Amino acid sequence: MAEHIIELRNVSKDYEGTEALKGIDLKIHKNEFVTLLGPSGCGKTTTLRIIGGFEQPTTGEVLFEGVNISELPPYKRRVNTVFQRYALFPHMDVYENIAFGLRIKKLDEATIEQKVSRMLSLVNLSGYERRSVTSLSGGQQQRIAIARALVNEPEVLLLDEPLGALDLKLRKEMQIELKNMQQALGITFIYVTHDQEEALTMSDTVVVMSEGEIQQIGSPVDIYNEPENAFVADFIGESNIIDGIMLRDELVIIQGKEFPCVDKGFAKDELVDVVIRPEDIKLVPESEGILTGVVESVIFKGVHYEMLVKCEDYHWMVHSTLMEAEGTRVGLTVLPNDIHIMHKMRTSTASQEVEVGHE
C-alpha cells in the first residue's frame, strides 16, 4: 500500500451546535494532487483548516506521518497554505514577499537568493524580482503567493480555492500550471474547490463532500463514470436522475419500460435512483426507441446541442452533436453500461474510513 502522509481519525467540528464535520476518517497519500470538492457549507474548507492547524477539531485526531499534530500551531506543521485572498505584503517587492519566510528562518543571503530564483522560475516570473506586487495582475499575484508558500519546501501544500478570483481563461491556464508544479515538485497538494471541472482537470483523487460527510472518493474518471449516490451524480457534471424499480439483477424499470443494465445486488422490486449522463442517451426514430417523447428545447453549447426531451412527466437532458428540432417526436435508447443504478440516498450516511491514493 502506498505510504500516507496525513490521516484524519473521527474528526468532527462543531460551531455552537452546528456540525461542520461529522466524524470523518480520511487518509491522504504522499505526492498526490487531492481535491476536496463540494458545495458551500459541505465542510471542505473546515477540513483544510483543521489540517493546517487554523481550526481545532471538536473530536478526533490529525496525524502527520503517524504522529498526532492536533495540538501543533500552524507554524510548527510541515504544511503551508495558499488562500483565495493572496495576503501579499504590499510594501514589499516580489523578491521580498517570496523571501519573507526564509528570512524568518535566518537563512544566509546566498541561500535565499538561490531559493527565490528557483521559485520565480517555477512560476514563470523570472525577472520580476523588484516589481511591486501591487503592479501585478491577479494571476501574477497568485503565482507569487504560491511561490512564497513553496519556497519553504513544505511536504504538503494546502490551497483554499486559490483561483476563485481569476477570470475564466486565466483560471484554466493556472489549473494546468498548478498541476505541472505539483508534478515537478513531487509534493502533496490538497486543494479545495466547489468547481467540478477544476477538480476533474487537476486531481489525481477527488474527495466529494456534502453536509460534513464524505460521499465518495476516487479518481476523476471513477467519480464521473461511477457515482456512488445521487448527490455525487448530480454534483459532478450533468445527470438525468430518475426513479426506477430493480426488477431483478441487470434489469431495471424506468417510466414503465424495461432497460437492461449491468448492476447487481439489489433486492427484487427495490426502489432505486437511476443515473444516466446526457451524452449517453441516443436519439433515434420514434419507432426504435424504448422511450418516446417530444423535443421541447434546443440550446447550442459549442461542441454539442443540449436538448430537453419530455417523456411523460420527465424531461430528459440529451447532449448530442446532431440536433433534432423543437417539436420533433423522437425515441430514446441507452446502452446497459451507461445506466447507473444506486440505492436511494438516506438523509445521513454513516461515517466510514476511506483512503486517498493508489494501493
Image (cartoon, rainbow, N blue to C red):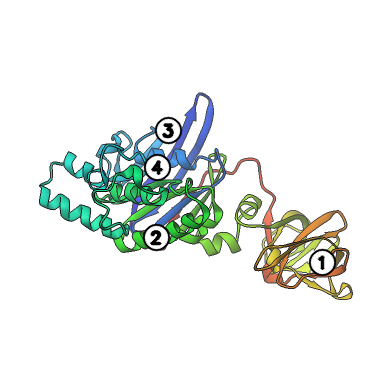
Point 43% across, 61% down: residue: 176
Q: Secondary structure at mark 2?
A: helix
- Of badges 3 and 2, nearer the viewer stands 2
Q: Is residue 217 visible?
A: no
Could you say where residue 60 lies in the image, as x and y percent from the top left? 41, 36
Three-letter residue code for mark 3: Thr
Q: Which mark is residue 177?
A: 2
Q: Which residue is mark 1?
A: 258
Does the residue at mark 1 contact the one at mark 4 (Cβ under 8 Å)? no
Q: Quadrant of the C terminus?
A: bottom left
Q: Is residue 175 above or below residue 164?
A: below
Could you say where residue 96 lies in the image, as x and y percent from the top left? 22, 44
Image quadrant in which you'd find residue 268: bottom right
Q: Dot 2, how many residues are within 10 Å of its Cα: few (below 14), some (14-19), or many (20+)?
A: some
- Relative side of 225 to 179, left or right: right
Q: Which residue is mark 3?
A: 59
Instruction: Name the N-terminal-most of marks 4 and 3.
Output: 3
